[in-house]
Amino acid sequence: MKIEREVGFLDPHDAFRGWLVGVLADRLPDPDGDVRVYRIEPASHVVCRYEFSGGVSVIGKFFGAPTGANSRYDPRKAMKNEYYRIQRVSGLVRVPHALAAKSRFHAVLVTDYIPGPTIRELIAAKVSLYDHLTGVAHLLRRLHDNTRTSCNRAREFSYFHKMLDQNQLPEHRRERFNHLLGAWWHSPRIRRDEGCMVHGDATPANYLVGNGVWAIDFEGSRNHAHPIRDLGILAAELKAPHGNGSRAEDWIGHLLWHYSNGEEEFRHYTRDLPFFMALGYLRIARLPWRAAERDRLLQEAEACLAAAPG
């Protein structure tokens, strides 16, 4: 669950505040007014909302201030990568506009603030998701269709092995996964001619509902990926809290149906989905705060991968 808590104000003489005011100069009715700071958690980096007098708010994401396990990266490169990826897709799908980036201030990326709950928050509130998942499906389809390219099949399998490595499985279980992956590798699935740019971190926390559906957090976005990677990761995230609940399966079917252009394509993508759902389960299982669910998530991943990839 996303938590936003007030942590104070930006000092009038603060250098970051001065830069931020310069970035937003034409949007601020009162540039000299107070700037409230709200910390947004959980997040893999320090993320804050800055609220200016007059109601203008923006989001600051500090790549130079990681809060997760991964701190071995180039903050400046990561900042610029997400900045340019957001700029690239902003004409295709609803994303908060990337307003500015600055290495000096802990490699900060500043984007528009979009008010509204995330899909994850709506799940927790037990709200019907069907209309919202239709919006997500259409957003992802527009993103994928407008960035079509080849699929780097070897890299997709390499990423799967990376997730297995991070789960640190005992040798006998890793061998089972390796065997199952081999069957997929030698199958006609995950085709090389089906590549595109993917969101890359298609979790319910990264889709906002506010005057339509918006995608946030393009840090993990990749080119030459398979489009169903996004669908599979989201499907695993939808089902993980519910075990074998039929409600989650209905959501997944609804998502895939509204993503697909007709019944034949739906059947085609349904055959690819288990591979990427397994990947999604492994992504969740590696998280320390999901340790109590780890065995079940690994079983789900193995069961998905065991689905015949013919």
Image (tube, rainbow, N blue to C red):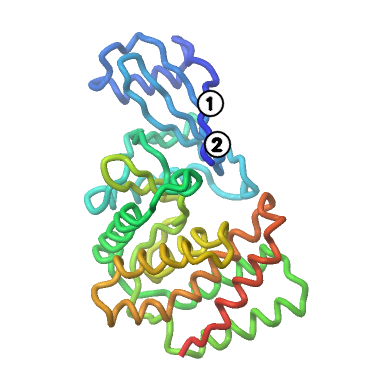
* Relative to 229, 131 lies left or right: left
Residue at 32% across / 35% down in the picture? 99
Residue 103 visible in the displayed image? yes
Rendered view: 53 above or below 158: above
Q: Amino acid at mark 2?
A: Glu
Q: Which label belongs to residue 75?
A: none
Front residue of this view, candidates 88 and 121 = 121
Quarter in which the N terminus is drawn: top right
* 211 left or right, relative to 15: left
Determine the image quadrant of residue 23. top left
Position in image of residue 157 (x %, y %):
53, 75
**Looking at the image, can residue 81 be seen?**
no
Dot 1: within a 10 Å radius of its alpha carbon, few (fewer than 14), some, or many (20 or more) residues? few
Where residue 156 appears, as percent x and y from the top left, is: 49, 72
> For the residues marked 2 and 1, what is the alpha-carbon distance in whole angstroms?
8 Å
**Tally of numbered tags:** 2
Query: Which residue is found at the position 70% from the left and 76% from the top?
Result: 174
Tell me the kind of residue under disc 1: Arg
The residue singled out by tag 2 in the image is 41
Residue 196: image x %, image y %? Answer: 33, 67
Q: Residue at x 65, y 59 (%)?
A: 286
Q: Secondary structure at mark 1?
A: strand
Q: Secondary structure at mark 2?
A: strand
Q: Is residue 167 left or right of residue 104?
A: right
Q: In the image, residue 10 lies at what x, y percent?
A: 47, 16
- Checking the image for residue 5, the label placed there is 1
* Residue shown at the point (69%, 52%) measured from the top left: 288
**Is residue 77 or residue 33 the one in the foreground?**
33
Please tell me whether residue 265 is drawn above or below residue 64 in the rendered image.
below
Q: Are marks 2 and 1 in contact (CB under 8 Å)?
A: yes
Q: Nearer the viewer, residue 264 or 58?
A: 264
